Amino acid sequence: MTNFDINYNVCEPTVCSDDIRIRILNYQDCVEYGDNITISWTIDNNDKFPMSNNILWSFNNETFSNTVITENNEEPYYGFIDAPLTQGLLYFKIKSNINGTFYESSVCTINISNNCGANTNIIPVKICNCISNSNPFNNLWIEEKGFPIIIDETVGIYTIYFDYNNNCYYIDNECYSNKQLVNDDPNKTILNFNDSIISFNYFDCDDCCKSNNCYMKDFDSGINTNNGDVYFLEVGETNCITVQHKSYYSNKSIRIIVSNSDTGEILYNSGYTTDANWIKTDISVNNIINITVTVITNLDEIIKWRCMVNCCD
């Protein structure tokens, strides 16, 4: 790590009138060639959604010519970098645009080496109690290296919920405290984050379970300036779907329209709303095969929104 204070904040313009700061939570000090690097951070003293939120990095210099967008849109944020295939020093910082002002973290460094000298730890995984789980692994472990473990000195380990092989699992503080060195125990199923197909971005077990039980779509705009994004979904065998949506900006509106793709019948029209809390509506889709979801925003505004479609509870 560099000699900079990890909590140091830079903003543009140079003189800032607020206390917003970017706080890097954790990252690996040494990473071997080609391995996955996980970096996580929070933005303290901020109640606005970042218009951009990126990792800037470069190798063996401080040009910061590479950009990685955050993997998620809820704190704590995290992103992944593939380590270079040669030895050297990787420099990185976080840069976020909040309400038109850019904020930066301090610069940190990661040693890229062919031998970091660290033993491989594995972490036990807990199973979510999902009705939809199908033959989940009862002795599942995952390699710590590369996995997006997010540590905050004030709360400890953030619980991570994930999907693997259509089953839901999670890692919490207790799991992390029981990590151990990898061994050849044939009774353990060990996942490698770089090789395994794992889906993140679940709020909790219920969110993951519901997604597996009857998941159709989770629309996330990124930063959206298009008027009329259209999505086509197959309903399946359910007779009822739940539509949830929200705007991340309390003064900018979105409108959600759900219609029968085959007949054009309007099933749901939210009207224009600026609600930053989830708006949840159940819609009858009896005998309907396909639906169309249209998200309408003001073309002249930068809008951040999210919309989820699932089966009803």
Image (cartoon, grey):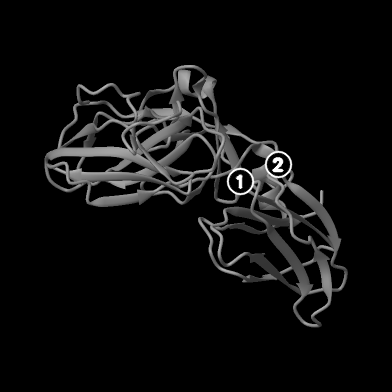
Classify residue 144 by image quadrant.
top left
Q: What residue type is labelled 1?
A: Asn
Horizontal and vertical percent for residue 131? 74, 44
Please indicate whether residue 58 sits to the left or right of residue 69 in the image: left
- CB within 8 Å, label 1 to label 2: yes
Taking depth in this image into account, of 257 and 150 the one nearest to the observer is 257
Mark yes or no: residue 178 visible: no
> Could you say whether the residue bearing mark 1 is in a helix, strand or loop?
strand
Please indicate whether residue 170 sits to the left or right of residue 65 in the image: right
Horizontal and vertical percent for residue 197? 46, 51
Compared with residue 80, is residue 270 higher up or lower down, i.e. above or below? below
Circle 2 residues within 10 Å: few <14, some 14–19, many ≥20? some
Which mark is on residue 167?
1
Taking depth in this image into account, of 186 and 269 the one nearest to the observer is 269
Q: How far apart are marks 1 and 2 (CA)?
A: 8 Å
Compared with residue 237, is residue 179 higher up or lower down, i.e. above or below? above
Q: Which amino acid does label 2 sit on?
A: Cys
Circle 1 residues within 10 Å: few <14, some 14–19, many ≥20? many
Which residue was labeled with disc 2? 130
> Could you say whether the residue bearing mark 2 is in a helix, strand or loop?
loop
Question: Which residue is pictured at 58% across the width and 38% down the height?
Answer: 169
Taking depth in this image into account, of 41 and 186 the one nearest to the observer is 41
Horizontal and vertical percent for residue 162? 55, 42
Mark yes or no: residue 303 visible: yes
Classify residue 235 by image quadrant.
bottom right
Classify residue 159 by image quadrant.
top right
Please indicate whether residue 310 sits to the left or right of residue 228 in the image: right
Number of numbered discs on residues: 2
Horizontal and vertical percent for residue 249? 61, 48
Question: Which residue is pictured at 74% across the width and 60% down the height?
Answer: 272
